[in-house]
Amino acid sequence: VDRIARPTPDHRSWVAVGSDADVRGTATLARGRDGDVHVAFLVGDAWQRRGIGRALYRALAPDAVAAGHPAVTATILGDNVPALRFLRAMAPRARSRFVDGEVVVRVPVRSVSPGRSRRPMPAAEVAA
């Protein structure tokens, strides 16, 4: 929570909050020890497949682009098919490789305008 509340140039998070003040999901953009910029998404089970991840991606992408990161890295468990589908939907040109039971995905990032989504905005507000 402390890292979410205090963003730095190397670590920033977004939180999707519903009108009832419940957290629907989070996204984090952080520079790893390897120098790569990593991205992580977490959406509550009850809120998956409702556009929360897309809203978080739309909030995160412009900051990644503005910071000069043309691509980010995500690491996903190999059997997490929904997460792989999500990243491929967000970035069809993403490249992936299988490493020790995980899929490492290199996601090209481009700024996304809110009007380009195929789904309506979810019933949650995304804040950095």
Image (cartoon, rainbow, N blue to C red):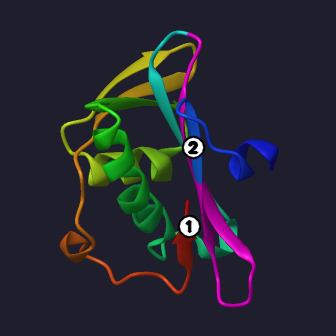
Query: Looking at the image, is 8 positioned above or below residue 96?
Result: below
Q: Which residue is mark 2?
A: 12
Q: Helix, strand, or loop for circle 2?
A: strand
> CB atoms at circles 2 and 1 under 8 Å apart?
no
**Residue drawn where x is 73% and y is 89% of the image:** 20
**Residue drawn where x is 56% and y is 19% of the image:** 32
- Looking at the image, which is closer to me, 27 or 94? 27
Q: Is residue 17 left or right of residue 118?
A: right
The numbered mark at residue 99 is: none
Q: Position of residue 36 (x, y in %)?
A: 45, 18
Badge 2 local density, few (<14 within 10 Å), some, or many (20+)? many
Q: Is residue 26 left or right of residue 121?
A: right
Query: Looking at the image, is 13 positioned above or below residue 68?
Result: below
Q: Type of residue at label 2? A: Arg
Q: Helix, strand, or loop for circle 1?
A: strand
Q: Position of residue 106 (x, y in %)?
A: 34, 27
Q: Is residue 25 left or right of residue 76?
A: right
Query: Looking at the image, is 45 positioned above or below residue 9?
Result: below
Dot 2 or dot 1: first in sequence order is 2
* Residue 22 covered by magenta stretch: yes
Q: Which residue is mark 1?
A: 127
**Residue drawn where x is 35% and y is 35% of the image:** 67
Q: Which corner quadrant of the image does residue 92 belong to?
A: top left
Answer whether residue 83 is visible to the viewer in this image: yes
* Residue 20 covered by magenta stretch: yes
Q: Type of residue at label 1? A: Ala
Predominant secondary structure, magenta span: strand
Q: Position of residue 48 (x, y in %)?
A: 56, 69
- Looking at the image, which is closer to me, 48 or 121? 121
The magenta region covers 14-33
